[in-house]
Amino acid sequence: MFMASEFILPGLATVLANAQPLMAAALAIVVLGERLGGRGKAGLALGFIGILLIAAPQYQAPAGNTFVLGASYILLAAVGITISNVLIRALAERADTLMAMGSQMLIGGIPLLVGAFLYEDPMSITFSPQFLLILFTISLFGTSLAYWLWSEILRTTELSRANAFAFLVPGFGLAMGVAFFGETIGLLTGLGIFVTLVGVAMTNMDRPEPAQTSDASVNQSTAAKKTGNV
């Protein structure tokens, strides 16, 4: 995801990255057996439409090979997060969440550390107090704590419903921009945030439709009751 930021514009990156909840919902149906009713599916669709509206003011026509490379990086990251979320949901009820998430961070950190020394120059970083504060904040709160809380949520909540809240991330980012950096939110962006909120609410108010019972099963059940009465 970080690599993609060098090659793709922020608006389009937001749209591509937020396709993840839709992919996760589809994979959850196949792997986890989750089922969404009509309201839940419509809610996910509305959430994504809201993302399109939020990103619209930043959207510009892609240019050349850099767009293809950046889009590939983002889609690859979205697929990775999708698979990760499905696996976390599958493990949530069978493993200690602190151990599972801690092990994940340690294992994932090894190739990143090796790659940093092979492809980057760690000595070029100025380890100022501000840099260290940001680094520890991202590591402890933005990553470790966030993943632990996420795994705890997935113990009791279906992935499709919990993952719909991912659509709110751009909205939180915009709100922080307004609060701390004096940014403004336009009419189209505000509409996108509202549509996203409605979509998330619809997804989480959804109740799966009961499985349809075949006519044969109904007839057998009715016959059995009549026999019992006789």
Image (cartoon, rainbow, N blue to C red):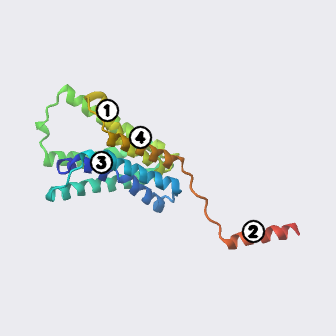
Q: Nearer the viewer, mark 2 or mark 1?
A: 1
Does the residue at mark 4 contact the one at mark 2 (Cβ under 8 Å)?
Answer: no
Mark 3 lies on residue: 108
Q: Amino acid at mark 1?
A: Met
CA–CA distance in space, label 4 to label 2: 47 Å
Does the residue at mark 2 contact the one at mark 3 (Cβ under 8 Å)?
Answer: no
Name the spot of residue 215 as percent of width and height, x first: 68, 72
- Please tell me whether mark 1 sits on a helix, a strand or a loop: helix
Q: Amino acid at mark 4?
A: Trp
Asked which quadrant contains residue 124, the reply is: top left
Name the spot of residue 41 as percent of width and height, x first: 47, 55
Q: Amino acid at mark 3?
A: Gly
State the quadrant of the C terminus: bottom right
CA–CA distance in space, label 4 to label 1: 23 Å
Mark 2 lies on residue: 221
Mark 3, residues whose alpha carbon is within 10 Å: few (<14), some, or many (≥20)? few
The residue depicted at 69 percent of the width and 70 percent of the height is 217
Of pointers 4 and 1, the one earlier in the residue sequence:
4
Q: Nearer the viewer, mark 2 or mark 3?
A: 2
Q: Residue furthest bottom?
A: 216
Mark 4 lies on residue: 148
Q: Is residue 161 visible?
A: yes
Of pointers 4 and 2, the one earlier in the residue sequence:
4
Q: Is residue 1 left or right of residue 19?
A: left
Mark 2, residues whose alpha carbon is within 10 Å: few (<14), some, or many (≥20)? few
Q: Amino acid at mark 2?
A: Ser
Mark 1 lies on residue: 176
Does the residue at mark 4 contact the one at mark 3 (Cβ under 8 Å)?
Answer: no
CA–CA distance in space, label 4 to label 3: 15 Å
Q: Nearer the viewer, mark 1 or mark 3?
A: 1
Name the spot of residue 196 as percent of width and height, x first: 41, 45
- Please tell me whether mark 3 sits on a helix, a strand or a loop: helix
